[in-house]
């Protein structure tokens, strides 16, 4: 049974538990809800919660663990000589999983029976049949691959059957036990509120656990990379020429330079425009103008970055090339450049700077403005000498947050800045960034045992440390500012 149908059954059972739990509580009180310890809805919620939550936990753990267990058993059953013929186990397992899925599709569409799928023989016709079903295989389907796929399919089917029995058994068991324990003196409200509190704690822990998982995965793979490639060559190397055939030069300095250069241009565009827009909206604009202008400005933050990348590639880049690549100037040879990506990224960052700065300026106490006006200062003098200095710590925090956003941008850089890793001061040349190279190093069938693939994790770790430092500084400044003016 598919997991989605299993989930639907558990949800229906939980809904039934709510109705029966509420009815059983009322019947135990003789129909008088005033005798109940808790409101009637709590009794139904208790049965529904105890039916749903354990079953969903078992289902979630099963969905995560089953692929690992099946892959381990199938991998262990494949002879070493067969693995050597296919190059490595990861490439062979990708064909095994695709072929197993193709067999399932064939059975579902009636192209073959389940018995035929279990006793199918390898051959060219099998590959053609899989291609006709939309299943692309990376190599010829030989007998070991087909046998492994059949084994994979058998184990998956067995696991799905056991999963259905276990999940439904847990759901029905808790359903019956909780329903039996439901009576008028049961402290249902306390149980439900404890369950909700536990759910909220788990939800709050997801962010922490996710961060820990990301950091640990980066650390382990970074340590593995530095066992294969010298750390000094990585941090101080000026050449970036990866080669999966050996002899790679993986210096990060050109990538850091491109990242910082593009981010600097983006901030040079976003900070003045965003800051002036924030001052206008908070100090000069009337309420009707502000009610229209601020949402329109913040629409820029909701545009997908791939759209900004296409805008850079198709509009901004050719326009800059028309101006700076003409006869006599010849500064810009191609549409992709640091300036192209920097300008478009700056447009993307404008709402980040303006919205945060606007909120910070509005947080400055009105008493400071009134005191300045009382001393005879004009509106512009009050903004320059009172409001802006008071809001400056928060504005700096907003700029640092925008800088961390710029450093981590990928799609605009991939489409607008090019892919050349170089150290140059010319903003009209193509360069690349750390994020773009992370994408390129992990694209395709990369061998994760090679330094050319593992370097992506080292790049990610470096980027993580940079953005984390900027975020910590920004949050420290913003919190200090808020404590001063709240």
Image: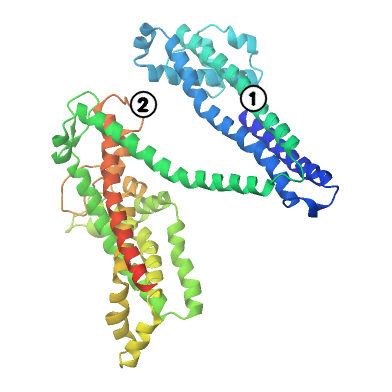
Q: Image point 64% across, 34% down: which residue?
A: 7
Splitting the image into 4 quarters, where does residue 44 fall? top right
Whether the residues at callouts 2 and 1 have beta carbons within 8 Å, the answer is: no
The residue closer to the viewer here, 92 or 161, is 161
Sooner in the amino-acid sequence: mark 2 or mark 1: 1
Image quarter (top left, top right, bottom left or bottom right) of the N terminus: top right
Q: Residue furthest right?
A: 30
Q: Image point 18% across, 55% down: which residue?
A: 330
Identify the secondary structure beneath mark 2. Answer: loop
Residue 276 position (above or below residue 109): below
Q: Is residue 84 visible?
A: yes
> Which mark's residue is nearer the viewer, 2 or 1?
1
Q: Which mark is residue 27?
A: none
Distance from disc 2 to disc 1, alpha carbons, whole Å, reads 34 Å
Neighbours of disc 1 within 10 Å: few (<14), some (14-19), many (20+): some
- Tally the marks: 2
Residue 478 position (above or below residue 245): below
Residue 103 placement, left or right of 309: right
Could you tell me residue 221's position as x and y percent?
29, 31
Residue 22 placement, left or right of 370: right
Identify the secondary structure beneath mark 1. Answer: helix
Q: Which mark is residue 164?
A: 1
The residue closer to the viewer here, 208 or 426, is 208
Q: Is residue 418 visible?
A: no
Could you tell me residue 286's position as x and y percent?
46, 81
Q: Image point 38% across, 65% down: which residue?
A: 356
Identify the residue under disc 2: 445
Splitting the image into 4 quarters, where does residue 251 fall? top left
Residue 461 placement, left or right of 125: left
Neighbours of disc 2 within 10 Å: few (<14), some (14-19), many (20+): few
């Amino acid at each position: 049974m598919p997991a989605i149908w299993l989930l639907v059954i558990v949800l229906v059972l939980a809904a039934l538990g709510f109705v029966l739990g509420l009815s059983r509580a009322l019947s135990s009180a003789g129909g008088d809800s005033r005798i109940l310890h808790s409101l009637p809805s709590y009794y139904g919620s208790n049965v529904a919660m105890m039916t749903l939550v354990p079953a969903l936990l078992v289902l979630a753990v099963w969905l995560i663990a089953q692929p690992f267990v099946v892959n381990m058993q199938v991998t262990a059953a494949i002879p070493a000589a067969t693995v050597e013929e296919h190059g490595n186990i990861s490439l062979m397992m990708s064909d095994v999983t695709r072929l197993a899925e193709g067999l399932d599709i064939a059975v579902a569409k009636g192209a073959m029976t389940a018995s035929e799928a279990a006793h199918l023989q390898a051959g060219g016709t099998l590959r053609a049949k899989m291609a006709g079903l939309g299943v692309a295989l990376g190599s010829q389907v030989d007998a070991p691959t087909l046998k492994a796929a059949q084994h994979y399919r058998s184990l998956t089917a067995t696991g799905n059957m056991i999963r259905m029995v276990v999940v439904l058994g847990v759901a029905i068991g808790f359903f019956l036990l909780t329903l039996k324990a439901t009576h008028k003196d049961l402290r249902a409200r306390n149980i439900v509120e404890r369950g909700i509190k536990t759910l909220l704690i788990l939800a709050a822990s997801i962010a922490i656990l996710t961060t820990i998982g990301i950091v640990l995965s980066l650390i382990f793979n970074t340590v593995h990379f530095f066992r294969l490639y010298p750390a000094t060559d990585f941090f101080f190397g000026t050449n970036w020429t990866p080669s999966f055939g050996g002899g790679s030069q993986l210096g990060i300095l050109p990538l850091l330079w491109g990242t910082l250069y593009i981010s600097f241009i983006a901030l040079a565009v976003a900070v003045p425009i965003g800051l002036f827009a924030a001052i206008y909206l908070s100090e000069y604009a009337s309420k009707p103008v502000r009610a229209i202008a601020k949402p329109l400005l913040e629409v820029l933050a909701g545009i997908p970055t791939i759209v900004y990348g296409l805008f850079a590639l198709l509009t901004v880049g050719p326009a800059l090339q028309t101006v700076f690549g003409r006869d006599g100037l010849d500064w810009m040879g191609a549409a992709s450049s640091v300036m192209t990506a920097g300008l478009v990224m700056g447009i993307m960052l404008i709402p980040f700077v303006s919205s945060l700065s606007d909120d910070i300026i509005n947080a400055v106490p009105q008493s400071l403005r009134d005191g300045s006006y009382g001393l005879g200062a004009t509106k512009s003098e009050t903004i320059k000498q009172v409001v802006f200095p008071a809001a400056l710590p928060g504005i700096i925090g907003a700029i640092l947050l925008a800088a961390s956003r710029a450093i981590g941008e990928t799609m605009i850089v991939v489409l607008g800045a090019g892919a050349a890793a170089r150290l140059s001061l010319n903003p009209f040349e193509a360069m690349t960034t750390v994020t773009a190279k992370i994408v390129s190093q992990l694209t395709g069938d990369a061998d994760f045992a090679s330094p050319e693939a593992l370097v992506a994790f080292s790049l990610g770790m470096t980027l993580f440390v940079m953005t984390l430092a900027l975020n910590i500084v920004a949050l420290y400044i913003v919190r200090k500012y808020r404590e001063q003016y709240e």
